[in-house]
Amino acid sequence: MVQQQESRTASYTTLAAGPDFRHEIDIKRSRFITVLRRASNEDSARGLVAGLRREFHDARHHCSAFVLGADREIQRSNDDGEPSGTAGIPMLEAIIKRETTPGHADLSDVSAVVVRYFGGILLGAGGLVRAYSESVSAALERAPLVQRRRLRICEASVPHAAAGRLENDLRAAGFVMAETSYGARHTVLRLAIPDGQADIAAASERVLSLTAGKAALMPGGTEWVDVPLP
């Protein structure tokens, strides 16, 4: 996806692409079902709440929190009937304070909903804060995460017969590959490279070397690309 508005940061951590992630814990006979969604906008984040209200229509609470944007500029939470400050804010803080590497918290584009089925035992304000925070933290501990980086997309056009081997060689050399496109006679390989002259020059030299000077690397725009966590 092409970044529409430049952000201050060039990377952050988010959920891996895929279906919503679910995790459940029981605390004093109350069920806390946490559902996490990777969300790029508020409609998607709020859509998770709406969908779970339909699915778990008999649950007492559907509390929510979400953090959006590379700079985490959008942050929202909702207690959904729990005492003020005992559900949504603890959930939000669990997302914001989640360390993705030691001493570094940068999780974003995450929507979290905790569905609670009351078990008959009152937890008190402090107990609710701990329960909702723990529910989200436990889910994030188990959910698959990726690093999302703003990278320069560079293209190399090569004959179809040479594309597979070149792509394998570039991957083996540690390059991140973006989506490949195919023309009538050529395959266009797209490399996602850190946005610096030295990195682009090094990639260009590698492509020239691997193709015996037959393919040139053409820099393009920047895009947000998922890469494995370091």
Image: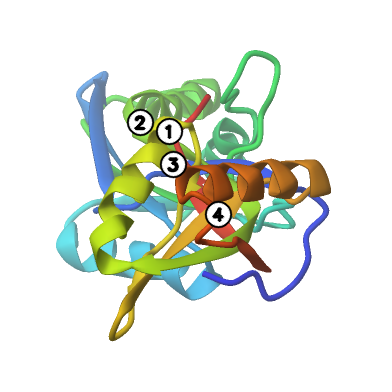
Which mark is nearer the camera, 3 or 1? 3
Marker disc for residue 139: 2
Disc 3 to disc 1, C-alpha distance: 38 Å
Q: Give the amino acid type for the residue marked by disc 4 in the picture.
A: Gly
Q: Which numbered disc, 3 or 1, marks the residue that appears first in the sequence? A: 1
What residue is pinned by disc 4? Answer: 213
* Mark carried by residue 63: none
Residue reaching furthest bottom? 184
Q: Is residue 36 left or right of residue 23?
A: right
Observer-side mark, 4 or 1, equals 4
The answer to whether 73 appears left or right of 25 in the picture is right
Q: Position of residue 200 (x, y in %)?
A: 71, 49
Q: Nearer the viewer, residue 92 or 12?
A: 12
Q: Is residue 66 above or below residue 183?
A: above
For marks 2 and 4, give the CA distance.
49 Å
Q: Tell which residue pokes out farthest to the top in this image.
A: 102
Indicate the position of residue 144 as horizontal and vertical percent values.
35, 34
Q: Along the polypeptide, which appears first: circle 4 or circle 1?
A: 1
Judged from the image, the secondary structure of the residue bearing numbered disc 3 is helix
SS at circle 1: helix
Q: Nearer the viewer, mark 2 or mark 3?
A: 3
> Label 1 vs label 2: CA separation?
5 Å
Tags 1 and 2 in contact by the CB under 8 Å rule? yes
Mark 2 to mark 3: distance in Å?
Answer: 35 Å
Say which residue label 1 marks: 136
Q: Amino acid at mark 2?
A: Ala
Q: Position of residue 179 (x, y in %)?
A: 39, 63
Find residue 155 and report its image quarter.
bottom right
Mark 4 vs mark 3, CA separation in Å: 15 Å
